[in-house]
Amino acid sequence: MFSGIVAGLGSIKSIKENDDIVSISITAPKNFGKNLKKGASVSVDGVCLTAKNSKSDTIKFDVIGETLARSTLGNLTKGQKVNLERSITANTEIGGHLMSGHIHNVAKILSVNTSENSTDMKISIPKGIGKYILEKGYIGINGCSLTVGKVSKSNFNIHLIPETLKVTNLSLLEKKQFVNIELDQNTVSIVDTVERILSR
Protein backbone atom coordinates (compact mmCIF):
# COMPACT_ATOMS: atom_id res chain seq x y z
CA MET A 1 0.00 0.00 0.00
CA PHE A 2 1.00 3.60 -0.61
CA SER A 3 -0.03 7.00 0.74
CA GLY A 4 0.00 8.93 -2.53
CA ILE A 5 2.70 11.30 -1.26
CA VAL A 6 5.48 11.18 -3.84
CA ALA A 7 8.95 10.85 -2.30
CA GLY A 8 10.79 12.18 -5.32
CA LEU A 9 11.43 11.95 -9.04
CA GLY A 10 13.30 9.10 -10.65
CA SER A 11 14.84 9.04 -14.12
CA ILE A 12 14.50 6.11 -16.52
CA LYS A 13 18.06 4.82 -16.99
CA SER A 14 17.40 1.90 -19.32
CA ILE A 15 14.58 -0.07 -20.93
CA LYS A 16 15.12 -3.61 -22.21
CA GLU A 17 12.52 -5.84 -23.85
CA ASN A 18 12.78 -9.51 -22.87
CA ASP A 19 10.14 -11.73 -24.50
CA ASP A 20 6.86 -10.93 -22.73
CA ILE A 21 8.30 -8.54 -20.11
CA VAL A 22 10.17 -5.26 -20.12
CA SER A 23 13.04 -4.67 -17.69
CA ILE A 24 13.53 -1.08 -16.58
CA SER A 25 16.20 0.57 -14.46
CA ILE A 26 15.41 3.80 -12.65
CA THR A 27 17.87 6.21 -11.09
CA ALA A 28 16.17 7.24 -7.85
CA PRO A 29 16.86 10.28 -5.65
CA LYS A 30 19.75 9.98 -3.20
CA ASN A 31 18.96 7.64 -0.28
CA PHE A 32 15.61 6.59 -1.76
CA GLY A 33 16.93 3.03 -2.03
CA LYS A 34 18.45 2.99 1.46
CA ASN A 35 17.39 -0.24 3.23
CA LEU A 36 15.28 -1.17 0.20
CA LYS A 37 15.02 -4.96 0.06
CA LYS A 38 14.77 -7.15 -2.99
CA GLY A 39 11.09 -7.92 -3.51
CA ALA A 40 9.91 -4.66 -1.95
CA SER A 41 7.03 -2.75 -3.52
CA VAL A 42 7.69 0.63 -5.13
CA SER A 43 5.16 2.91 -6.78
CA VAL A 44 6.37 4.11 -10.20
CA ASP A 45 3.99 6.74 -11.60
CA GLY A 46 1.33 5.08 -9.47
CA VAL A 47 2.04 1.52 -10.63
CA CYS A 48 3.08 -0.97 -7.95
CA LEU A 49 6.28 -2.71 -9.09
CA THR A 50 8.58 -5.19 -7.35
CA ALA A 51 12.23 -4.25 -6.86
CA LYS A 52 14.71 -6.78 -8.30
CA ASN A 53 17.67 -5.49 -6.30
CA SER A 54 18.37 -4.03 -2.87
CA LYS A 55 20.07 -1.07 -1.20
CA SER A 56 20.73 0.88 -4.37
CA ASP A 57 19.58 4.16 -5.84
CA THR A 58 19.47 2.48 -9.25
CA ILE A 59 16.44 0.24 -8.92
CA LYS A 60 15.53 -2.48 -11.39
CA PHE A 61 12.05 -3.78 -12.18
CA ASP A 62 10.39 -6.27 -14.52
CA VAL A 63 7.07 -5.13 -16.00
CA ILE A 64 4.65 -7.66 -17.49
CA GLY A 65 2.53 -7.11 -20.59
CA GLU A 66 -0.72 -6.63 -18.66
CA THR A 67 0.79 -3.77 -16.67
CA LEU A 68 2.27 -2.19 -19.79
CA ALA A 69 -1.11 -2.33 -21.53
CA ARG A 70 -3.10 -0.86 -18.63
CA SER A 71 -0.76 1.99 -17.75
CA THR A 72 1.55 4.61 -19.23
CA LEU A 73 4.60 2.46 -18.46
CA GLY A 74 4.33 0.95 -21.93
CA ASN A 75 5.35 4.32 -23.37
CA LEU A 76 8.32 5.12 -21.15
CA THR A 77 11.43 6.61 -22.74
CA LYS A 78 15.01 6.84 -21.53
CA GLY A 79 15.54 9.91 -19.36
CA GLN A 80 11.83 10.32 -18.60
CA LYS A 81 10.97 11.47 -15.07
CA VAL A 82 8.68 9.26 -12.99
CA ASN A 83 7.08 9.68 -9.57
CA LEU A 84 8.45 7.33 -6.90
CA GLU A 85 7.10 6.24 -3.52
CA ARG A 86 8.09 3.35 -1.28
CA SER A 87 5.38 1.27 0.36
CA ILE A 88 4.07 2.48 3.69
CA THR A 89 4.83 0.92 7.07
CA ALA A 90 2.98 0.94 10.38
CA ASN A 91 4.80 4.17 11.24
CA THR A 92 4.12 6.00 7.97
CA GLU A 93 2.09 9.20 8.14
CA ILE A 94 -0.81 8.92 5.68
CA GLY A 95 -0.64 12.40 4.21
CA GLY A 96 -2.79 11.51 1.21
CA HIS A 97 -5.11 8.50 0.98
CA LEU A 98 -4.45 4.77 0.82
CA MET A 99 -3.53 3.58 -2.66
CA SER A 100 -2.81 0.06 -3.91
CA GLY A 101 -0.77 0.84 -7.01
CA HIS A 102 -3.29 -0.99 -9.20
CA ILE A 103 -4.16 1.27 -12.12
CA HIS A 104 -7.79 1.33 -13.26
CA ASN A 105 -7.22 3.15 -16.53
CA VAL A 106 -5.25 5.82 -18.36
CA ALA A 107 -6.78 9.20 -19.14
CA LYS A 108 -5.92 12.02 -21.54
CA ILE A 109 -5.09 15.53 -20.39
CA LEU A 110 -7.49 17.92 -22.10
CA SER A 111 -6.04 21.21 -20.90
CA VAL A 112 -3.42 22.69 -18.57
CA ASN A 113 -3.87 26.24 -17.27
CA THR A 114 -1.10 27.68 -15.12
CA SER A 115 -1.35 30.80 -12.96
CA GLU A 116 1.04 32.31 -10.43
CA ASN A 117 -0.07 30.13 -7.52
CA SER A 118 -1.59 27.01 -9.03
CA THR A 119 -2.12 24.86 -12.08
CA ASP A 120 -5.55 23.63 -13.15
CA MET A 121 -5.67 20.47 -15.21
CA LYS A 122 -8.70 19.06 -17.03
CA ILE A 123 -8.60 15.29 -17.55
CA SER A 124 -10.90 13.04 -19.58
CA ILE A 125 -12.98 10.39 -17.84
CA PRO A 126 -12.40 6.93 -19.34
CA LYS A 127 -15.49 4.91 -20.19
CA GLY A 128 -17.06 3.05 -17.30
CA ILE A 129 -15.47 4.82 -14.32
CA GLY A 130 -17.25 8.17 -14.24
CA LYS A 131 -19.58 7.15 -11.41
CA TYR A 132 -16.57 6.71 -9.13
CA ILE A 133 -15.12 10.18 -9.71
CA LEU A 134 -16.84 12.60 -7.34
CA GLU A 135 -16.19 16.26 -6.62
CA LYS A 136 -14.10 16.65 -3.42
CA GLY A 137 -13.32 12.93 -3.51
CA TYR A 138 -9.89 11.33 -3.77
CA ILE A 139 -8.18 10.17 -6.94
CA GLY A 140 -4.69 8.94 -7.76
CA ILE A 141 -2.93 10.59 -10.73
CA ASN A 142 0.50 9.14 -11.57
CA GLY A 143 0.75 7.99 -7.97
CA CYS A 144 -0.20 11.36 -6.45
CA SER A 145 -3.09 11.53 -4.01
CA LEU A 146 -5.25 14.42 -5.22
CA THR A 147 -8.65 15.95 -4.56
CA VAL A 148 -11.11 16.01 -7.44
CA GLY A 149 -12.38 19.43 -8.50
CA LYS A 150 -15.31 20.11 -10.81
CA VAL A 151 -16.73 17.02 -12.53
CA SER A 152 -18.75 16.77 -15.74
CA LYS A 153 -19.94 13.76 -17.74
CA SER A 154 -16.78 13.55 -19.79
CA ASN A 155 -14.04 15.13 -17.69
CA PHE A 156 -12.88 16.32 -14.29
CA ASN A 157 -10.53 18.97 -12.95
CA ILE A 158 -7.66 18.85 -10.49
CA HIS A 159 -5.99 21.85 -8.89
CA LEU A 160 -2.25 21.58 -8.24
CA ILE A 161 -0.41 23.71 -5.69
CA PRO A 162 3.24 24.75 -6.17
CA GLU A 163 4.54 22.18 -3.66
CA THR A 164 2.92 19.31 -5.57
CA LEU A 165 4.31 20.61 -8.85
CA LYS A 166 7.77 20.97 -7.30
CA VAL A 167 8.14 17.36 -6.15
CA THR A 168 6.24 15.44 -8.87
CA ASN A 169 6.24 15.05 -12.64
CA LEU A 170 2.80 16.65 -12.90
CA SER A 171 4.57 19.93 -13.68
CA LEU A 172 5.98 18.32 -16.84
CA LEU A 173 2.65 17.17 -18.24
CA GLU A 174 1.11 18.75 -21.31
CA LYS A 175 -2.17 18.67 -23.20
CA LYS A 176 -2.86 15.36 -25.01
CA GLN A 177 -0.50 13.37 -22.79
CA PHE A 178 -1.84 10.45 -20.74
CA VAL A 179 -1.79 9.81 -17.00
CA ASN A 180 -2.38 6.76 -14.82
CA ILE A 181 -5.66 6.77 -12.90
CA GLU A 182 -6.27 4.90 -9.65
CA LEU A 183 -9.75 5.28 -8.22
CA ASP A 184 -10.34 5.61 -4.48
CA GLN A 185 -11.23 2.08 -3.41
CA ASN A 186 -13.54 3.28 -0.64
CA THR A 187 -15.57 5.24 -3.18
CA VAL A 188 -15.70 2.24 -5.52
CA SER A 189 -16.92 -0.03 -2.72
CA ILE A 190 -19.61 2.41 -1.55
CA VAL A 191 -20.95 3.12 -5.05
CA ASP A 192 -21.04 -0.57 -5.97
CA THR A 193 -22.72 -1.50 -2.67
CA VAL A 194 -25.41 1.17 -3.03
CA GLU A 195 -26.10 0.12 -6.63
CA ARG A 196 -26.38 -3.52 -5.59
CA ILE A 197 -28.82 -2.73 -2.77
CA LEU A 198 -30.98 -0.44 -4.93
CA SER A 199 -31.20 -3.06 -7.67
CA ARG A 200 -32.79 -5.66 -5.40
Image (spheres, rainbow, N blue to C red):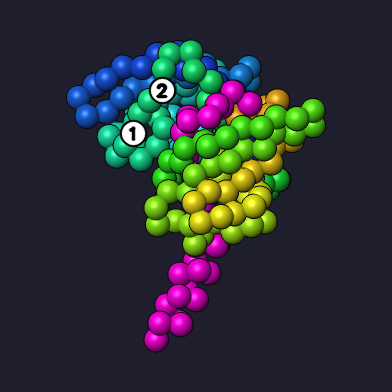
Crowding at dot 2, Cα within 10 Å, few <14 / some 14-19 / many 20+, comes out as some
Which residue shows up at 54% across the image and 42% down it?
123
Label placed on residue 76: 2
In the image: residue 18, left or right of residue 118: left
Which amino acid, mark 1? Leu
* SS label for mark 2: loop
Outermost residue to the left: 19
User: Which residue occupies the foreground of this view, 186 or 58?
Assistant: 186
Residue 90: give x, y in percent of width and height.
64, 49
Distance in Å between CA atoms under marks 1 and 2: 10 Å
In the image: residue 17, left or right of residue 143: left
Residue 184 is one of the magenta-drawn residues: yes
* Residue 185 visible: no
Residue 121 is one of the magenta-drawn residues: no
In the image: residue 145, left or right of residue 38: right
* Residue 71 visible: yes
Which residue shows up at 67% across the image and 37% down it?
120
Which residue shows up at 40% across the image and 13% down it?
14
* SS label for mark 1: helix
- The total number of labels drawn is 2
Residue 81 vs 123, above or below: the answer is above
Residue 39 vs 33, above or below: the answer is below
Which residue shows up at 56% across the image and 45% down it?
140
In the image: residue 21, left or right of residue 152: left
Residue 74: give x, y in percent of width and height.
35, 28
Which amino acid, mark 2? Leu
Label placed on residue 68: 1
Mark 1 or mark 2: whose residue is earlier in sequence: 1
Q: Give the range drawn in magenta.
A: 171-200
Picture quarter with the C terminus: bottom left
